[in-house]
Amino acid sequence: MKKIGAVLTATVLALGVATIPAQPADAAPTKFKNCTMLNQTYKGGVAKNATVRNKGGKTKYTPTVNAAIYNSHTKLDRDKDGIACER
């Protein structure tokens, strides 16, 4: 009886894991209309890489580093320092 329970549990777990949809690695980043919307998800803005420095002065939050999201929101980087919508 224990063997049947173990096999049944293993089967249910295997089927449950197999049905979880995988996120595609090349999924398009979300497009935000303005900095208010972007800052709701990324509080400190989005930086194109980890080495960029803020030109605009002191900020409250550290930006999220994500080149794909930054590249789709370059128009929101008003001071052209490599960080879109820094706060």
Image: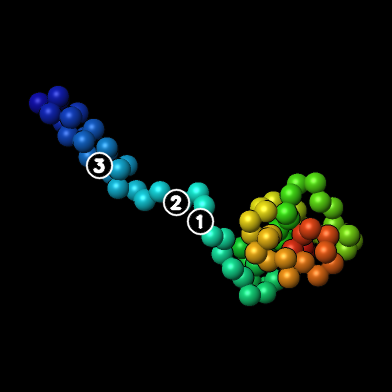
Crowdedness near tag 3: few (<14), some (14–19) or many (≥20) residues, C-alpha within 10 Å: few
Q: In this image, 16 relative to 74: left or right?
A: left
Q: Which residue is mark 2?
A: 23
Task: Locate residue 57, reporting x and y percent.
Answer: 89, 61
Disc 2, SS: loop
Give me the disc on residue 27. 1
In the rendered view, tell whether residue 13 sits above or below residue 73: above
**Viewer-side label of 2, 3:** 2
Residue placed at 83% from the left, 64% from the top? 80
Q: Quadrant of the N terminus?
A: top left
Residues at circles 1 and 2 in contact by the CB criterion of under 8 Å: yes
Disc 1, SS: loop
Could you say which is closer to the camera, residue 66 or residue 63? 66
Q: Coloring scheme of the render?
A: rainbow
Residues at circles 2 and 3 in contact by the CB criterion of under 8 Å: no
- As measured in the structure, the alpha-carbon distance from the residue carrying label 1 to the one carrying label 3 is 25 Å
- As measured in the structure, the alpha-carbon distance from the residue carrying label 1 to the one carrying label 2 is 8 Å
In the rendered view, tell whether residue 56 sits above or below residue 25: below
Q: How many marks?
A: 3
Residue placed at 83% from the left, 60% from the top? 81
Q: Which residue is mark 3?
A: 15
Q: In this image, 22 relative to 41: left or right?
A: left
Identify the amino acid type marked 3. Leu
Residue placed at 84% from the left, 53% from the top? 53
Task: Locate residue 40, reporting x and y percent.
Answer: 63, 67
In the rendered view, tell whether residue 85 sits above or below residue 53: below
